[in-house]
Image: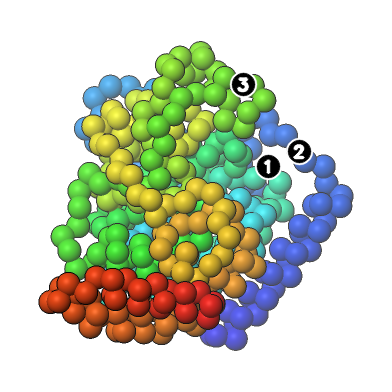
Amino acid sequence: MASKVSCLYVLTVVCWASALWYLSITRPTSSYSGHRQFNTISIARKNVSFGNIRTRPINPHSFDFLINEPTKCEKSIPFLVILISTTHKEFDARQAIRETWGDENNFKGIKIATLFLLGKNSDPVLNQMVEQESQIFHDIIVEDFIDSYHNLTLKTLMGMRWVATFCSKAKYVMKTDSDIFVNMDNLIYKLLKPNTKPRRRYFTGYVINGGPIRDVRSKWYMPRDLYPDSNYPPFCSGTGYIFSADVAEMIYKTSLHTRLLHLEDVYVGLCLRKLGIHPFQNSGFNHWKMAYSLCRYRRVITVHQITPEEMHRIWNDMSSKKHLRLLVYRLQAPFIKAQKLKGARVKSKILYILLVRALEISS
């Protein structure tokens, strides 16, 4: 069985490389018009309806699952579901995440479910490649909307719908992107804390307080007829945010009666405002690129704009030097105790600075 999976994996990598080379050389970027179906992928679809909706939806999200993993949470309930927004050509990024921070087996005794979110592509070759990848890894879900930047909101709502339908008993959910490095130790043990009672109506990340950009040349342009107000509600950067699993269904249901916006993180903020849920600011979430330093990366939860190669390098370095972190804690502990007993704050602080510098040198 292991050799079969290995062969399938190698075949998938080769096919991806060949397909991407062929597409880049021979195929112009095509535009999508009309409603096209996968003509080579036959997937069992499950249409889901939610109760307690009394008015006619203005945004019914009437898409079918083309690729689904409906049984992913059946054997055991995940503590954390990770939803990663990605595109068809980002196989290297998905594989890097699978082999580093997104590995579902990183934490013994803590169930994690990792899923990659995609729409369908207008190119059937790419759809076939993703289908083959799904058959090997079983961590991809796809709905039949076109995968594009302006449909990122639909992609996130698909993830919310999936959690609400197939994994509603999970404790927490993370939504992030495929170019994000996640410090899972900080996320699991410092923020979510598995040994504490799970929170409800909880939402946190890098909170942004801003307003619409009216410059049509901007990537984040928002026309007045779509959003006339001068300020957005507080929202978390779409590069990475965490919420309790009960919020997934709340946001999905609310979205059915909320006019769609193409800016996914702003739209989620609008739904949160309707729900009366205020996102908490957390400085550990970074929505920008940060130069690698072992000590610096050990203090954060997310870092943006990380390539697959960087992801492997950072993960390997942090994993190989975990013992140094434990050493700092063990050496520092008696001085912290002495500080409390004797008030020797200066000595403790100096020692801590020296230990941190030693750790930086070793990185």
Q: Residues within 10 Å of mark 3 (few under 14, many from 20)?
A: few
The quadrant of the rendering that contains the N terminus is bottom right
Mark 2 and mark 1 in contact? Answer it, CB < 8 Å.
Answer: yes
Residue at the spot of label 3: 215
Q: Judge from the rendering whether residue 326 lies leftward or rightward of residue 103; answer left or right.
A: left
The quadrant of the rendering that contains the C terminus is bottom right
**What residue is rendered at 64% in x and 21% in y?**
216
- Residue type (three-letter) at the residue carrying disc 1: Ser
Q: Distance from label 2 to label 1 (Cα)? A: 7 Å
Q: Judge from the rendering whether residue 326 lies leftward or rightward of residue 183; answer left or right.
A: left
Badge 3 marks a residue whose secondary structure is loop
**What residue is rendered at 83% in x and 46% in y?**
27
| Mark earlier in primary sequence (3, 1) | 1
Badge 2 marks a residue whose secondary structure is loop
Residue at the spot of label 1: 122
Q: Which mark is residue 30?
A: 2
Q: Residues within 10 Å of mark 2 (few under 14, many from 20)?
A: few
Q: Judge from the rendering whether residue 122 lies leftward or rightward of residue 280; answer left or right.
A: right
**Outermost residue, left side:** 341
